[in-house]
Amino acid sequence: MGIEIKTVKLEAPKDCNLILGQSHFIKTVEDLYEAIVNTVPQAKFGLAFGEASGHCLVRCAGNNDELTELAGEKILEMGCGHSFLIFLKDAFPINVTQRIKSVSEVVNLFCATSNPVEVIIAESDQGRGIIGVVDGSKPQAIETAKDVDYRKEFLRNIGYKF
C-alpha cells in the first residue's frame, strides 16, 4: 500500500484550548486526569487516548461531559494509536504542559493551542501515526514597537506578568 497522507481538523470549543500529544500506555488517561486536576483544580476538561494494541479502544476521562465526548470523537476520527487529546477550559495550556510532560508515559506534545489545528497523519498497512500539526495561520510580518507594547500589556492584563 505505501503511505497515504491525510489531515484531520481539530478546533477547540469557544473559550477552550487543546493539547495534542503522544504516549504509550493504558494508564495514560488516569495519569493525565490526575496531572490536570492536581495542577489546576478548577479546570474543566475532557481527554481521550487511542490505544495501539490489545482492544485498540479510545479511552476517555474528564470532568466535563461535552469536552470528554468531543475528545473521544476526535481521537477516533484521527485513528492514531498512542495519541491523546485534551480539551481544556478555565485554564491555559501553559498552566499544565510541564506537568503533562512529566507524566511518565507521555512521549511528545505536538501542540497546545486555542488555534484551529490540522493534524497531518500518515496511514500505512499497519495503522496511522501523527506526522505533525499545522497550528493556526502563518506569520504575516515582524512586530513593530506598537505590537511589542500590545504584547506586554496583554500579558499583564491576563495576569502572566506584573
Image: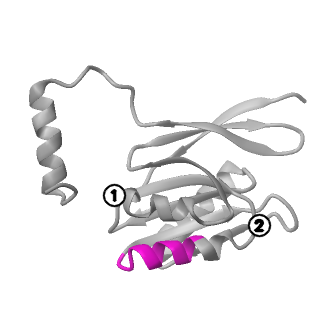
Q: Position of residue 77 (x, y in %)?
A: 66, 52
Q: Are marks 1 and 2 in contact (CB under 8 Å)?
A: no
User: What residue is drawn where x is 9% and y is 29%?
Assistant: 146
- Within-10-Å neighbours for mark 2: few <14, some 14–19, many 20+: some
Asked which quadrant contains residue 123, the reply is top right
* Location of the C terminus (image quadrant): bottom left
Residue 57: numbered disc: 2
Check residue 20 for magenta coloring.
Answer: no
Residue carrying label 1: 14
User: What residue is drawn where x is 61% and y is 74%?
Assistant: 31
Q: Amino acid at mark 2?
A: Leu
Residue 149 appears in the rendering = yes
Residue 66 appears in the rendering = no
| 159 shown above or below 146 | below
Query: Which segment is the magenta one?
Result: 32-42
Q: Amino acid at mark 1?
A: Lys
Left or right: 18, with 30 as reference point: left
Residue 130: numbered disc: none
Decide which of tag 1 and tag 2 comes sooner along the chain: 1
Q: CA distance from mark 1 to mark 2?
A: 28 Å
| 129 shown above or below 39 | above
Left or right: 27, with 159 as reference point: right
